[in-house]
Image (cartoon, helix red, strand yellow):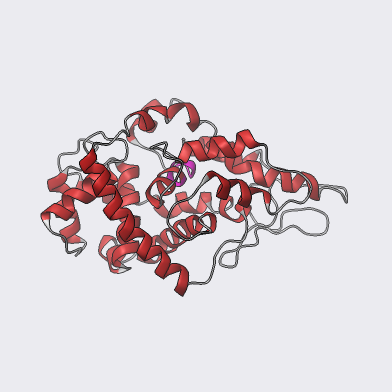
Amino acid sequence: MHGRSWEAAMSTSIFGASDSTSSVAPQIDGDGCNQTDSPVPILQHQQNTQFHLQTAEKSCLYTAAAPLFAGMGGAASRFAAPMKQRRVERDLDNKVVEALRERARTRKKTFKSVNSITMRLPRFKDGLRDMRDVFDHYDGDSNGSIDNEELRRCLRQLQVQMSEKEVDDVHRYCDIDNREGIQFQEFVVLLCLMYLLFGPNVTRQVSEFESAKLNYVFDELIDAFLFFNKEGDGKMRRKDVTQRMNEASHQERTPSHITTQLFKEMDLDRNGKVNLKEFLFAMIRWAGLETDEDDSNDTSP
């Protein structure tokens, strides 16, 4: 999704105040006016607007993701991995799950509603904006993707200690669309996973001056996954999405086609479960972090 597409969706959506415990979200005064500098219009009148507010907050994430539904079909169709890659997926998934469980035990929960996550998407985009320069730095031949050798150089500079086989496995794991190379959005996913597994030293090596911003974004993206993954097993299911999107409203349930489509957008391998890697890939796209292809296809002024 283009950044402009996300901004257009934000400008026409109605949000409630975020109830996150970690960041400032738009607040509404007694007249229904937005007290922050957010461009999001807020309800203007009436005592009974809470019902409409709750309905809108549940659907805003779907509004942001809707333009991607048709375009992401190709990534899903290319995701039929051979047996060796499935073994790599399983092994790395297990390591990620262990890190997620440890994180859940030691950190206070960040999010309390779907709306509080949706309100962060512009911040995610802003926090990851400078990652393009980092990607270009490691893309030595400037072909728009990072191959195995370039990834080895990248991980060495990030002081991530891995064997050659482990680097190969990570490369396969993060080649989400199976294009035999790690594109920009996949690179952001890779760095977030490295941050989870190896700690904040990874982001310090990426950029000493931007490490705090990257830590914030990666922490929030991982915590957003944990918000949906209530069972703590590293696998998000459609029922988790449905439950989370409906639990804040006591008047109307989110239409099933919305939750089904949102989950389908994340479940790239169509196995009925979404791991952290798939979730990060979807969230980064929904935030409007563009690829080279997106840039070249964007003809809007």
Q: In which quarter of the image is residue 179?
A: top left
266 in relation to 78, above or below:
below
Magenta residue span: 283-288
The x and y percentages for residue 277 are 37, 49
Residue located 80% across and 50% down the image: 50
Residue located 20% across and 42% down the image: 84
The x and y percentages for residue 29 are 78, 59
Q: In this view, does 250 lie to the left or right of 244?
A: right
Magenta-drawn stretch contains 213: no
Q: Is residue 135 at all visible to an observer of this figure?
A: no
Q: Quadrant of residue 297?
A: top left
Q: Nearer the viewer, residue 285 or 252?
A: 252
Q: In this view, does 32 lie to the left or right of 119?
A: right
Q: In which quarter of the image is residue 13?
A: top right
122 in relation to 98, above or below:
above
183 in relation to 156, above or below:
above
Magenta-drawn stretch contains 287: yes
The x and y percentages for residue 273 are 45, 45
Q: Is residue 84 left or right of residue 94?
A: left
The x and y percentages for residue 72 are 42, 31
Residue located 56% across and 39% down the image: 64
Q: Nearer the viewer, residue 106 or 136?
A: 106
